[in-house]
Amino acid sequence: MSSKDRKIGPALAAFEASVPVLLGYVTIGFGFGLLAVNSGYPAWFALAMSVFVFAGAAQYIGIGLFVAGASIPEIAIITLVANIRHAVYGLSLIEPFAAHPRIRPYLVFALTDETYALISSVDDEKRRDGRFLLFVSAFDQLYWVVGTALGALAGALIPYRIEGLGFALTAMFIVLGVEQALKVKKAFPFLIAAAATVGAKFLVGDRLTIVVGLAAAILFTIPFARRGGGDAQHR
């Protein structure tokens, strides 16, 4: 660590580094707590999810799936797809995490997009410091839990349901989809995903639409991805 970091200690250094996450997580966590209570779940349930699951967007997805009565296979597959990017994050952090076996399980559990971004942006000396890694991870989860608690409390105190909160997740994924489309600049994968979802809805009904649609989209896009990779190699 730098002389400044040694002077202030790893906890304060981690807090200073995580302030931007504090602002975002308290706000988004508040929305999750409010959504959970507004969907009919008790405040303690929302808080427990943020303590024992801590999965960000996947928690929003989970509430929507619970309300829709999704099956366990649907929940498992959708959660896996939504968080598969974490496998890539983990691969780049194998070495610093492996150096701290006692806290490694928690570091893996608490690894989110924002925590990964923070750890990736610091120098190698901080990245190898187990105390800094632990404090960054713990602070980020604390922000999310505090936001959830505030949102759940607000939801419990409001005497009426707030309509339209459930659409927040749909809106978020619409934005993410548009961003991906603009980045990829290829319409084919998105058309396949849309066609697979609509086709699955008519063929198997609402309960299995997500699972069948997702499987069909993956099967149809694998050959496309392989051809794309081959073309890239020939170019």
Image: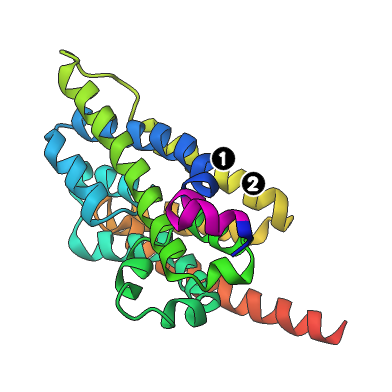
Q: Which of 133 and 161 is in front in this view?
A: 133
Give the magenta range.
4-14
**Tag 1 near tag 2, CB within 8 Å:** yes
87 to the left or right of 185: left
Q: Is residue 10 magenta?
A: yes
> Residue 96: which numbered mark, if any?
none
Residue at image x 80%, y 79%? 232
* Quadrant occupied by the C terminus: bottom right
Question: Outermost residue, top direction?
Answer: 159
Dominant secondary structure of the magenta stretch? helix
Callout 2 crowding tier (Cα within 10 Å): few <14, some 14–19, many ≥20? few
Q: Which amino acid does label 1 sit on?
A: Val
Identify the residue position indicated by label 1 in the image: 175
* Quadrant occupied by the N terminus: bottom right
- Residue 90, above or below 49: below
Where residue 98 sits: x, y (%)?
A: 42, 82
Residue at image x 19%, y 31%? 37
Q: Does the magenta stretch include residue 15?
A: no
Say how the picture is coloured: rainbow
Identify the residue position indicated by label 2 in the image: 179
Callout 1 crowding tier (Cα within 10 Å): few <14, some 14–19, many ≥20? few
